[in-house]
Image: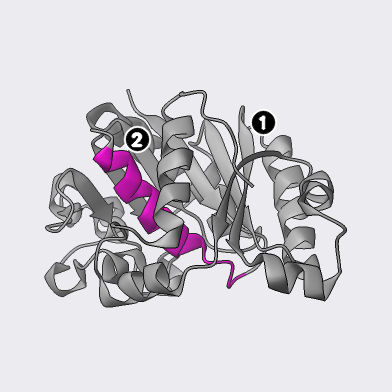
Amino acid sequence: MGKVTVITSGKGGTGKSTFTAGVSTALVRRGNRVLIIDCDAGMRGIDLMLGVSGELVFDIADIVRGNCSPANAIYPCKTVPELYVLPAPSDVSDKISPYIMLQLVRVLENYYDHVLIDCPAGIGVGFESAAIAANRALVVVNAEPLSVRGGEKIHRKLRHMKIPEIRLVINRFNERRFKKMGAFPDLDAVIDSVGARLIGVVPEDSASAACAQRGEPIEGRKKAVCAFDRIAARLDGEDVPLEL
């Protein structure tokens, strides 16, 4: 049975989906079979980032309606073997209820080492559906006040839902900009404000973001890739020292 991780953010624009694509690719490099479930109904993007959008026929809403089996709505990423995508509905009105989502994930987790659920930003019904089946959560924030405030709210919500393990990712970190902004004295203040234990800091990396937009694997010698690899190792249970 695979580990189910919901990847969340309090506000949009944190790079959460790019992070999901990057860390999932890193998990596959470690020999894992990985499924990404996109729960952002109406705003799906993981299919584009992983280069499978041209093949989509069914999505998660079709499974719920009985239009297809789960296997028919799960698409392999051709450029990253052992990485699979279950796309979100294209229509925002097709949000999946928390109860149905729980039943579906409980079936799918038996076939993968990791199930990563890309959660819509905010704390609405889409958030609850994405998080309900998770036994671990990653809260993705940028080191700026609005994002950190949103991360703290998400953290409280996840604790209320009794998610057993909640970790923090500081994404798109630019040390020069962080110091110039002066909103926090250091990264420890960011961590304390969100209230979740840090699992990794991902540096700002335009090359990785460009790969995601082109539907190419986030790998090679890009700045963010080392951070993705270290976070993936921690998700696999390895005791890897943090590098800030």
Residue 220 in which image quadrant: bottom left
Q: Position of residue 152 (x, y in %)?
A: 77, 52
**Amino acid, disc 1:** Lys
In the displayed structure, 179 sits above or below 82; it is below
**What is the image's colouring?**
one colour
Look at the image and tell me in which quarter the N terminus lies.
Answer: top left
Q: Please name the residue that numbered disc 2 is placed on.
A: 114
Q: Please name the residue that numbered disc 1 is placed on.
A: 162
Q: Earlier in the sequence, mark 2 or mark 1?
A: 2
Q: Residues within 10 Å of mark 1 (few under 14, many from 20)?
A: some
Q: Residue at x 34, y 40 (%)?
A: 104
Q: Position of residue 233 (x, y in %)?
A: 42, 33
In the rendered image, is residue 38 in sight? no
- Between the residue at mark 2 and the residue at mark 1, the CA separation in whole angstroms equals 20 Å
Q: Which residue is nearer to you in this view: 45 or 236?
A: 236
As for residue 117 lying within the magenta part, the answer is: no
Q: Which residue is nearer to you in this view: 71 or 234?
A: 234
Which residues are the magenta region? 12-29
